[in-house]
Image (cartoon, rainbow, N blue to C red):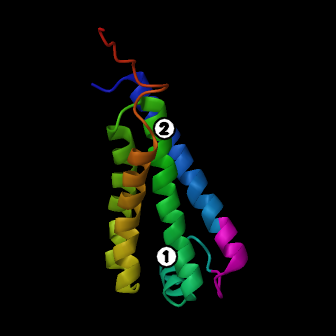
Amino acid sequence: MPTMKSLAGLVAGLVAAVAAMIAVGFVGNLFVPLSDAPVPGETEAVTVALAAAPLGAQVTVLLAWFAAALAGAAAARFISRASWPGWTIAGLLALLLAGTFLVPLPIWMQTIAVLGPLAGGAIAQLLVPLRRGAPDAIAVNA
């Protein structure tokens, strides 16, 4: 049964994921801008622009998705002190990005779009401990 701490972790994870994705995308766009920036509401124009973008811009998008899963899963795990909220964030992002297989993008980009968030979630699970503080001391009888 989800507790309030777990639900708070999910919400914080979603906020952290969106913030990380925007931040990495913004910084990456400063260094490697898309040549023809399309209107965000035009899905076909965005797809064509991303497929025709330079390699650096494509990698920036993939890094933004990876960073979103890493930050979101880490925040969710840190607040909830459970594994499932972090995996939920990473899994939802990977599931949403599985839709890239329906779009004419390079196959390497489609594959990394799904595997990147899962890798970010796995790294977050390794970096954020489930318990705060030092482990309990072991009593030794002499």
- The Cα atoms of the two marked residues, 1 and 2, are separated by 27 Å
| Image position of 54 with respect to 39: above or below | below
Q: Residue furthest right?
A: 30
Q: Is residue 30 left or right of residue 98?
A: right
Mark seen at residue 11: 2
Q: Which of pointers 1 and 2 indicates the residue nearer the eye? A: 2
Image quadrant containing the N terminus:
top left
| Image position of 34 with respect to 22: above or below | below
Sequence-first tag of 1 and 2: 2
- Where's residue 112, x and y in %? 38, 73
Q: Residue at x 34, y 70 (%)?
A: 99
Q: Is residue 36 left or right of residue 135?
A: right
**Total numbered labels:** 2
Q: Residue furthest front?
A: 142
**Local crowd at mark 2 within 10 Å, few (<14), some, or many (≥20)?**
some
Q: Are marks 1 and 2 in contact (CB under 8 Å)?
A: no
List the residue tagged with mark 1. Answer: 43
Q: Is residue 134 magenta?
A: no
Query: Hey, what amino acid is under mark 1?
Result: Thr
Report the front residue among 115 and 44: 115
Q: Residue at x 34, y 38 (%)?
A: 83
Query: Which stretch did the figure color magenta?
Result: 26-37
